Amino acid sequence: MKLVADLFDPEPQVWGLRGDPWVWQAMRDHLGDTYLPPTLGEAEAMLYTAFNRIVGVDLFAELEPSVYRPEFAHGGLSSGHIHLQTWRIDLLPLLVDRAQALL
């Protein structure tokens, strides 16, 4: 059985804002020892739920383009800011595609 942590390697080449890599790492840490669910729908739901819990927003209900979370602030101009559109369009779909490839 594959672990969810397998979905997070390699990291993406492009991020939206400086908080995004820290969210990626937090999701990897949160889900890392979890086995990949048997269906793509379950894997996708697990990833979106983890993101919503870690960032503290409903990714599809939030209207703002980004949110600030101090726990993801580690220096730099956009430090702590998470670009929700990048997560909607690129990062979470990337993880879902990787899950599909492993199922």
Image: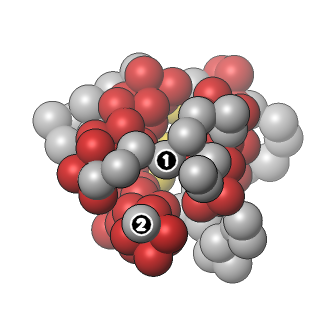
* Amino acid type shown at disc 2: Leu
Quadrant assignment, res 61? top left
- Tally the marks: 2
Quadrant where the C terminus is found in the figure: bottom left
Residue 16 shows in the view: yes
Q: Secondary structure at mark 2?
A: loop
Quadrant assignment, res 12? bottom right
Q: Secondary structure at mark 1?
A: loop
Q: Is residue 77 above or below residue 33?
A: below
* Amino acid type shown at disc 1: Leu
Residue 91 shows in the view: no
Name which residue lies at 84% across and 41% down: 75
Q: Please provide percent x and percent y for residue 64.
A: 27, 41
Q: Nearer the viewer, residue 84 or 53?
A: 53
Residue 18 is tagged as: none
Q: Give the Cα distance between marks 1 and 2.
A: 8 Å
* Scheme of image coloration: secondary structure
Quadrant assignment, res 86? bottom left
Q: Please provide percent x and percent y for residue 25.
A: 71, 43
Task: Give the residue number, with chain letter if any, for mark 1.
Answer: 36
Q: Is residue 41 left or right of residue 24?
A: left
Name which residue lies at 67% across and 38% down: 32
Marks 1/2 in contact by CB < 8 Å: the verdict is yes
Residue 103 is tagged as: 2
Of the residues under marks 1 and 2, which one precedes in the sequence?
A: 1
Q: Is residue 92 left or right of residue 8?
A: left
Q: Nearer the viewer, residue 75 or 60?
A: 60
Q: Is residue 30 above or below residue 93?
A: above
Q: Please provide percent x and percent y for residue 39.
A: 28, 53
Name which residue lies at 54% across and 63% down: 16
Q: Please provide percent x and percent y for residue 30.
A: 63, 28
Q: Is residue 4 left or right of residue 93?
A: right
